[in-house]
Image (spheres, rainbow, N blue to C red):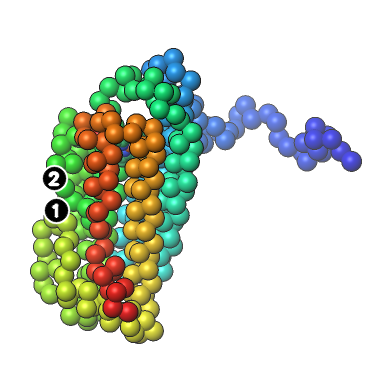
Amino acid sequence: MKNPAETVASEGAKLDYSSDMTYGDYLHLDEILGAQQPLSPVHDEMLFIVQHQTSELWMKLMLHELAGAMQALQNGHFNVAFKMLARVSRIMSQLVSAWDVLATMTPPEYTALRPYLANSSGFQSAQYRCIEFALGNKNAAMLKPHAHKPELLAMVQRAYDAPSLYDIAIGLLARAHLPIEAHNLARDWRQSHTSSPNVQAAWMVVYQDSSQYWDLYQLGEKLTDIEDTFRLWRFRHLTTVERIIGMRRGTGGTSGTGYLRAMLDVVLFPEIWQVRAEL
Ligand code: HEM
């Protein structure tokens, strides 16, 4: 039986990488692992920073997958889009579990850290806002936090101006010759979609005749998965925040849990939920 050191030697592992691209080079680990710069002497600030940074990395991947899926759907490539949309839901589920790590932070630990955060808040996350807009929760006021950063503003504005994933899905219902009224197909994309009886009726046909509309049926379920996991994320954000700051105001200036609780009422894909009562 070889010991671990002998195994490494006998595997012929290359140990001199002085002239190669290494793992750290490829992943730019110097930059990523150099980006945790606590402002306070508080031990728990590292958790706070890593939790937010990893969430932002996963959001970056989520936006990448959402953009790919929206493009694929517009080109009629359902299967390509389904793989990407499934990945979006899995990422979201992982972020739901991630709240458990942050929940180990106690109120006094956060209170010690809070003065150093000043007015910074997840509310100002440009990537999060792009995700909300891509999923159809449009709100012009949410552009304002980025007004002083032209590149970020341009990114968020693009997501705000573009049709959402759900707008694209409604377009696909029409492409399958289901009767969708024109106002759902050519509208001001900067407004959130509001529930429309003809869209609900079209989903009804899809769900009742799934063998004929298999792609759209699958799409309906992928959208359901995404909204389901997103709701869980919102809920765990609220409960984690409540256990850490109680009823205090947020660093972003909102009422705190009052604001987060109100966000639980957002419905992204209304007819997909309404149709369930009829099936
Ligand atoms: C101790 C930890 C946390 C606390 C106390 C907290 C608190 C809050 C509060 C009170 C808000 C409402 C806006 C405000 O007034 O600031 C908010 C918004 C937000 N937070 Fe957190 N949060 C925490 C962790 C996180 C983490 C880890 C993320 C992950 C990126 C995050 C992402 C967001 C986002 C995206 C919003 C905007 C939500 C929306 O507009 O619907 N938060 N947070």
State the CA–CA distance, disc 2 to disc 1.
8 Å
Residue at coordinates 44% horizontally, 41% vertically from top-left?
Answer: 99
Q: Which quadrant would the C terminus be assigned to in this image? A: bottom left
Q: Residue furthest top?
A: 41
Question: Seen in the image, is 103 located left or right of residue 163?
Answer: right
Residue at coordinates 34% horizontally, 31% vertically from top-left?
Answer: 245
Residue 122 higher or lower than 168, as above or below: above
Q: Does the residue labelled 2 lie within 8 Å of ligand 1?
A: no
Residue at coordinates 28% horizontally, 30% vertically from top-left?
Answer: 248
Identify the secondary structure beneath mark 1. loop
Query: Residue 122 occupies which quadrant of the picture?
Result: top left
Of the numbered discs 2 and 1, the one sitting upstream in the chain is 2
Please rate how many residues cluster around mark 1, counting C-alpha atoms within 10 Å: few if below 14, some from 14 to 19, many from 20: some
**Ligand 1 quarter of the rendering:** top left
Q: Which quadrant would the N terminus be assigned to in this image? A: top right
Residue 53 higher or lower than 183, as above or below: above
Residue 9: give x, y in percent of width and height.
80, 34
Q: Can residue 124 be seen in this view?
A: no
Which amino acid does the dot numbered 1 rest on? Arg
Q: Nearer the viewer, residue 53 or 8?
A: 53
Q: Mark 1 points at which residue?
A: 190
Q: Do callouts 2 and 1 mark residues in contact (Cβ within 8 Å)?
A: yes
Please rate how many residues cluster around mark 2, counting C-alpha atoms within 10 Å: few if below 14, some from 14 to 19, many from 20: few
Residue 130's disc number: none
Residue at coordinates 28% horizontally, 69% vertically from top-left?
Answer: 272
Residue 140's disc number: 2
Q: Nearer the viewer, residue 257 or 182?
A: 257
Question: Seen in the image, is 212 located left or right of residue 250?
Answer: right
Q: Is residue 15 visible?
A: yes
Q: Which of 149 and 49 is in front in this view?
A: 49
Residue 120: give x, y in percent of width and height.
28, 28
Identify the secondary structure beneath mark 2. helix
